Amino acid sequence: MAGLTERRGSESDSFWTWREQMYRFVARLTPDDLEAIAAQAYLEMLEAGFTWVAEFHYLHHQPDGRPYANIAEMSERIVAAAAEVGIGLTLLPVLYRQGGFGGKPPSEAQRRFINDRDSYARLMETKVPAGRIGIAPHSLRAVALDDLKWAVETWRGQPAHIHVSEQTREVEDCLAAHRRRPVDLLMDTVEVDAHWCLIHATHADAGERTRIARAQAVVGLCPITEANLGDGLFDVPDFLAEGGRFGVGSDSNVRISAAEELRTLEYGQRLIHRQRNVLGDAGQSTGRRLFDAALAGGRQAVGAVDDAVVVLEGSLDYWLFSADNAAIVSVERGGVRLVEQGRHRDRERITERYRKTLARLLA
């Protein structure tokens, strides 16, 4: 979808209008399509400095909503794509039960995502060799609170990721349905601890940010996507001052770059605070602090310690604020060289398959 949604519609464009275009696109994807697209995304991630991916995966069923003969068909394609490319994987099968707060029925566009408890439990049996599996209740609008508690209790101790407070409308709808803001509702319903990653949390208020920090949960910031969708900015300095933890994710994949995610994060804070080096420590490298914080938060969020080595040309500040992906010389995992001079070792073959897939989908 990269580059296909940058035209203003007849109404005010937002996350919600983008979502409808995304639904129309994913409705056409076959298992082969998904594997080809995922492999290309993972290849680009490795070339961009990401060595482990938490795949928030909710495209489970056939276009008409019926499960495949193997209910984990699509999940297994994600696992295969990660293994082919060589990236570390934490698979997060998404629990999606309803179309909105208050038990709103899912739309036809969401039928490929929907699982009951039994089918979700079968998805959680997906094998992830040399990786991890965790739970992903999609959001408080997409799962009932009883289903949220069931998932958390059943897979306690596994990585747990959830979208929360990404848009102002989500906050307003949550207040109308539950008289509580999303982060407060989540933390009043289940025990949130260091196994959790709260994705976006853009519109969490000061009290909610304090609760996240005290719980030692990670906030999964996606600065490029949040900027592309016009979602808003998470207030990072106060959160870090309270001991808050963050990682970064590529989310919509409109642009895959670890450096640009961190640069956009810092530049967004510069714009709202009208200062330079907002997230840096006095007299120290801002790039170093951003990188170290994101690396620690990312490791915690995926529930694994990667054995990767990324070799850069120049300093961290040069990579993050100037050179971007061009500064990446090589990437190794487990002693295997996957990227050399900025190119994945299987780029030609994987990219050719991806291009053929995309040409057919866009025909």
Image: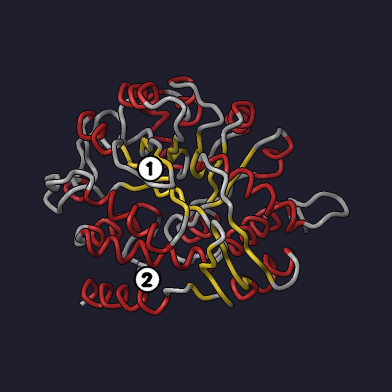
How far across and down, in percent of the image, does residue 239 sit? 67, 38
Secondary element at tag 2: loop
- Residue carrying label 2: 7
Q: Is residue 119 left or right of residue 137?
A: left
Q: Amino acid at mark 2?
A: Arg
Question: Observer-nearest residue: 97 or 273?
Answer: 97
Mark 2 crowdedness (10 Å alpha carbons): few <14, some 14-19, many ≥20: few
- The vertical placement of 163 against 63, above or below, is above
How far across and down, in percent of the image, does residue 303 sit? 51, 39
- The vertical placement of 334 against 168, above or below, is below
Q: Is residue 31 left or right of residue 81?
A: left
Q: Distance from label 1 to label 2 (Cα)?
A: 31 Å
Q: Amino acid at mark 1?
A: Leu
Mark 1 crowdedness (10 Å alpha carbons): few <14, some 14-19, many ≥20: many
Q: Residue at x 38, y 38 (%)?
A: 136
Q: Residue at x 57, y 44 (%)?
A: 305
Foreground: disc 1 or disc 2? 1
Dot 1 or dot 2, earlier in sequence: 2
Disc sitting over residue 92 in the figure: 1
Q: Residue furthest right?
A: 283
Question: Observer-nearest residue: 122 or 276?
Answer: 122
